[in-house]
Image (cartoon, grey):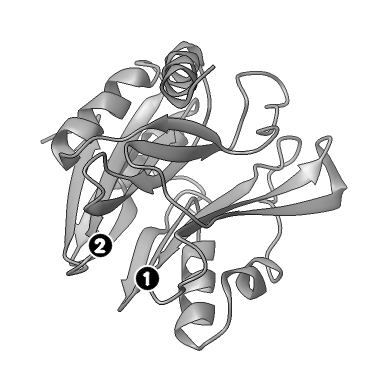
Amino acid sequence: MDVAERVQDNMNALAENVYPGRGIVIGLTPDRRSFVQVYWIMGRSENSRNRVFVREADTVRTRAWDESKLEDPSLIIYRCIRSFPGCHVVSNGDQTDTIFDAMSAGKTFEDALFTRTFEPDPPNYTPRIAGVVDLNDPTHAYKLAIIKAIANDGAHCARHVFNYETPIGGVGHCVTTYSGDGAPLPSFRGEPYMVETLDDPAELARLYWEALNEENKVSLLVKFIDVESERTRIEIINKHRG
């Protein structure tokens, strides 16, 4: 099976997955001019679904759509993306700030991850997923990571970092919190899988938005990072609009 066939199979599998949970894609556009970051959130509970993405300059954060219905904000309100010159961070929780603070102070992506663990939400122990495009690092195009409980056992933590040295035009790598629906929710298994990228951020946002389960999807963002100028473009889609 060649790369194009594998990418299409994986896109089909994503579309058939009722609940991959939160997901991150990082890759390179087909024209090789921009790195791509995609991040989405999904939800089954009213509290999880009561969210939108809000842009603040080059940062995007989650916000309650209806503040009167907001319950526990600790795991659902956070900054999804942050950046400083050359370095662009994305994650599914407040570890976005942990990684940003560490790397802006000269530490590594891995240093930051070793200070965090999976989310304290038994019995799911939701994995923390994260990624970085570090244009200051000549040895890697981008990195993805997942911190998760072993076999949904909160006593055991595993941290996996995946380094992508050479990007592939038109291809991204995807990691999600869950492998599907269930009780408890089954954590993502294996390594990030190859998925599709496009040259236009709005079209890429629509591609992934339409692939996600209609009932459970909540919000999605796409960030393009120009390889030469580092100029960024951000697209956001929220189920709650108005």
Give the class, few, some or many, for how many residues have Cα within 10 Å of label 1's Cα (few <14, many ≥20): some
Q: Circle 2 — which element? A: loop
Q: Circle 1 — which element? A: loop
Q: CA distance from mark 2 to mark 1?
A: 8 Å
Residue 103 — which label? none
- Name which residue type carries label 2: Val
Residue 208 in the figure: left or right of residue 15: left
Q: Which residue is mark 1?
A: 135
Q: Is residue 23 visible?
A: no
Give the class, few, some or many, for how many residues have Cα within 10 Å of label 2's Cα (few <14, many ≥20): some
Q: Is residue 134 visible?
A: yes
- Name which residue type carries label 1: Leu
**What residue occupies the far right of the structure in this picture?**
155
User: Against 71, is 163 above or below?
Assistant: below
Residue 114 in the figure: left or right of residue 199: right
Q: Residue 211 lies in what quarter of the image?
A: top left
Q: Which residue is mark 2?
A: 227
The residue at the point 61 percent across, 50 percent down is: 128
User: Against 179, is 226 above or below?
Assistant: below
Residue 74, horizontal then vertical, whole percent: 53, 56
Residue 197 in the figure: left or right of residue 183: left
User: Against 86, is 82 above or below?
Assistant: above
| Total marks in image | 2
Query: Which of 42/112 is in front?
Result: 112
User: Against 38, is 188 above or below?
Assistant: above
Mark 2 or mark 1: whose residue is earlier in sequence: 1
| Quadrant of the image containing the N terminus | top right
The residue at the point 46 percent across, 72 percent down is: 138
Residue 154, horizontal then vertical, whole percent: 83, 47
Residue 181, horizontal then vertical, whole percent: 61, 19
Residues under numbered marks 2 and 1 in contact, where contact means CB atoms less than 8 Å apart: yes
